[in-house]
Amino acid sequence: MKHRILAIVALLCAVGVFIAPSAIADDLTDVGTIAQSAIASLPAFVSANRQLTGIASQMQQQEAAQLKGAKNDAQRQQIQLSFSQRFNDKQNEILGPLLQRVQLALAAVSAKRKLSVVVDRHIVVYGGQDITTDVLNLVTGTQAIPPVTATPPPSPIGYVDQTVLDSGLPKVKAANDAFAKFAQQQRAIFAAKMQKATTSAEKQQISVDFNKVLADEQNTLLKPLVSKVRAITATIAEKKHLLVVVDKGDIVFGGTDITQDVRNGLNH
Amino acid sequence: MASITRLLAGVLLVGVVACSHVDVSSPNIRGIAYVNTNKATKAHPLYSQLQDLDAAIAAIDLSAAVPMVPKSPEEMKADIASIKAQLAQAEEQSSQAVGALQGRLAKEERTEVAAALRSAGLNSAAQAYESAPLISSAAQAQAIEKSAASDLQSYQKSVVEQGQATMGALEKRLHEQAQGRFQTRAAQYAREESDLSLRLSQQDANQRLALQTKLNNLALNDAQRKSLTAALKAIDQNEKAQVDAMRARHQKDLQAYQNELQAGIMKQIRSHATALQAQTQTQLQARQQQVSQQLAALSGPRLPANLPAATKAQLEQIASNLQQRYQTDLTKISDRFNQTRSDLEAQYEALNGVDVGAVGAAKQQRDKLAKERGDLYKKIEDQIAAAARRIAKRDGFSVVLLDPIAHPGGYDLTGDVISSLKSTGT
């Protein structure tokens, strides 16, 4: 009897182990990866970026010349705004068609491989389907890429635009500013100590202390905010049945955007 | 019976181990895992080294924030000399690198061209091409040209100097000859004048004696004495006038003779100069021609005329490829030199008080440490990623992500990665 029970338990566990992956067939296999750097290195992008660098330099000179003639801050702001707008327009004009072609290629390859999300390769250390070559082939091909009508399926990988959160939240901005000011003050204090130090051991210790002071302040000022943002992000992600949330910069195609939800959550 | 029990126990053990393992396919994981690289890095055995490097970099940054004590003129002088020496060394190294590159590519070109000629069945042309003297680099060619130009210049100088010396000697000789002739003529005139003076004196001697005798007579009155004295004086004046007239004539003749001699010298000099110039010109042209021929012989191997079109195209391709490689490598050498120069300029500016501390030796040291730090961090990152891959493969995860912002689901692989790093001792 005892042997029978043991045998059944063992058998159940063993069977469970060997058949479980095939029985629960919703492991995340629809994650694509791409090396964005490979796209940025395409001659068309390199050339476009070079062109934009030249334009930017030219515009900066023009802007500087006009700023000299500005009579007040309002005029200066107006000039800066105008140049910024002109540069953005130029950027859209030059890079727009290239980026559009990349997006079409990404959509086409993702649809063909049934991917719900494509992330940058540098955040993936294992697994995922690498679609870099397929996308590059389509982008560099001579034929037009037909648009994909179907939207990608919902992905359990979400993303937030941290730049929006950082710049849009007064508390985050204030904390960042306060930390920058603190760092500047401490740098002056520790620099004076460093001047008096005579041995390399003393110097080493001063720099260790300096780093610690900064880290402590960072923990005091920024860590609570970061923790809060992460907690809210996790709560929202859980509500939306997401498994993980990454930064928007790492998402190349698809994914679930929860930036606005997180922002709303932080403002409440 | 005992064996059945052991078998069941074994199966149970496998089952229990399997059951205790993470269920990667559970709805909350779905094959996704993630690693907190910051945490894993801090637990890495090499993290203390990373901290040491961070501290060393921070020490330099802090030192850079300290206003620098002005250097003494001696220190400044030594530092400037050191910067200049480093710049000269960088220039020399750069120049050598370009020379080596040109030499290497020239040899490759020779080999490839000869091979192309051989493949077209032009064996003798290939052999001739290979055996022609090789100017392995533009620098070498330039050096040879420079040397040839210098030789030619030296030769020109020596020929001109030789001509000048010849002309100088000729001029001296002609002047000496003229001087001799002039002096002979002048001496002759002096003798003639002296003769005339003597002749006149002898001619008037009786009359002069008679007058002087009369003057010795004490009974003469003043009027008589005066008349005799005037007569004597008139004789003297007459003699003098004749000698003076002769001397004046001689002077005039001598002046004319002098002019004639000078004109003769100039004429001879011009004549000799023209001859010498023609001779020098001929010598120089011959030498120049000789040098040109030598340079032409050294200007590298020659390709035969009327090459087949395919071979021509192949040779053009070889030239194009080599040119492209030359440009690429040259750019690298140039970039390296520019970087060094820029660093040295920054050091120089630092010596003169511009952004002291952020540049110069401190900057070099900081850059070196930053590179070491970057390399070490990459090594740590790579080991974390390798450990994560190993575990993910073993446990059957489909995807492993790094540093998600939030992770309500998925499996945190960080602990496993840290254990793996510690157990492997990396």
Image (spheres, coloured by chain):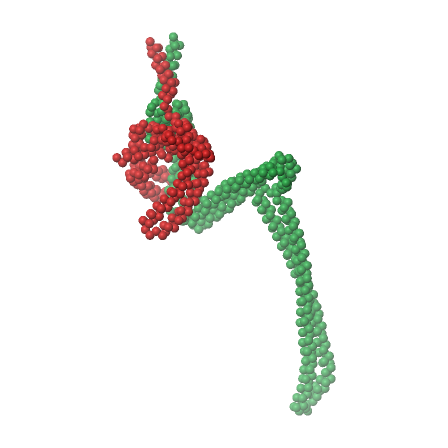
Chain colours: A red, B green
Depth check: A66 or B389 in front? A66
In the picture, the quarter occupied by the C terminus of chain A is top left
A34, above or below B96, in the image: above
- Numbered label tally: 0
Depth check: B228 or A126 in front? A126
Residue shown at 60%/46% (left/top)?
B144
Give the farthest residue toward the top. B1
Left or right for B217, reference A72: right
A13, above or below B405, in the image: above
A70, above or below A110, in the image: below
Depth check: B275 or A252 in front? A252
Residue B304, image x, y percentages: 64, 40
- The reply to whether residue B60 is in sight is no
Left or right for B178, reference B367: right
Quarter occupied by residue B108: top right
In the picture, the quarter occupied by the N terminus of chain A is top left
Residue A254, image x, y percentages: 37, 31
Residue B416, image x, y percentages: 37, 26
Give the farthest residue toward the left. A268
B160, above or below B14, in the image: below
Residue shown at 65%/53% (left/top)?
B284
Residue A5, image x, y percentages: 33, 12
- The reply to whether residue B157 is in sight is yes
Residue shown at 29%/28% (left/top)?
A239
Depth check: B67 or A68 in front? A68
Quarter occupied by residue A49: top left
